[in-house]
Amino acid sequence: MRVSFGFIIAAALLAAGPAFAQDGATLFAQSCAACHQPMGQGIPGAFPALAKSTFVQGTPEQVAHVILNGRGGMPQFGGDLTDEQIALVASYIRSSWGNKAAPLTTAQVAAERAAGALPAPVAGQQAH
């Protein structure tokens, strides 16, 4: 039986989870969509909608803060995702489903992480 090298790499990257995701849409699907739903509509009474959300379209610092630290029942992703990954997923959310907000930069997320004194994630460790 012959297995392509590309297939093996793709399978390994998928199994590795968010640490190797290449874009915000993939990160959202892996880390957020189970609660906030694939189209950002949320689940009423349980998980807020991200689609057409004034909060999501608000200040970049607040969005980064919530993704890093969690809020209510939302988990903290600061220990799981890098600043670049958080910027990617936040930028995706801020420009999807009717949202029209500026993207977040890695520097903005890093500044918010530093303000909250959160350590960067440890490679290979992932809680979500």
Image (cartoon, rainbow, N blue to C red):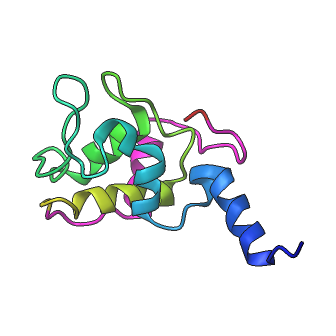
Q: x and y percent of residue 40 in the render?
A: 24, 48
Q: x and y percent of residue 105 in the render?
A: 37, 64
Please report the residue visible at 46 percent of the width from the left and 66 percent of the height from the top.
Answer: 23
Quadrant for the C terminus in the image: top right
Please report the residue visible at 67 percent of the width from the left and 52 percent of the height from the top.
Answer: 15
Please report the residue visible at 10 percent of the width from the left and 47 percent of the height from the top.
Answer: 54
Judge by depth and name the residue closer to the eye, 66 or 124: 124
Is 101 drawn above or below residue 34 in the view shown?
Answer: below
Q: x and y percent of residue 111 in the render?
A: 41, 51
Question: Could you tell whether 38 is left or right of 125 in the image?
Answer: left
Residue 94 visible in image:
yes
Q: Main secondary structure of the magenta part?
A: loop
Residue farthest to the front, as pictured: 1
Question: Could you tell whether 60 is left or right of 98 in the image?
Answer: right
Judge by depth and name the residue closer to the eye, 48 or 124: 48
Question: Could you tell whether 120 is left or right of 111 in the image?
Answer: right
Quadrant for the N terminus in the image: bottom right
Taking the magenta stretch, the answer to whether it contains residue 69 is no
Residue 110 visible in image:
no
Please report the residue visible at 41 percent of the width from the left and 62 percent of the height from the top.
Answer: 24
Query: Residues in magenta?
Result: 100-126
Is 65 drawn above or below residue 1 in the view shown?
Answer: above
Taking the magenta stretch, the answer to whether it contains residue 118 is yes
Residue farthest to the right, as pictured: 1
Task: Please identify the quarter of the rendering in which residue 65 is found.
Answer: top left
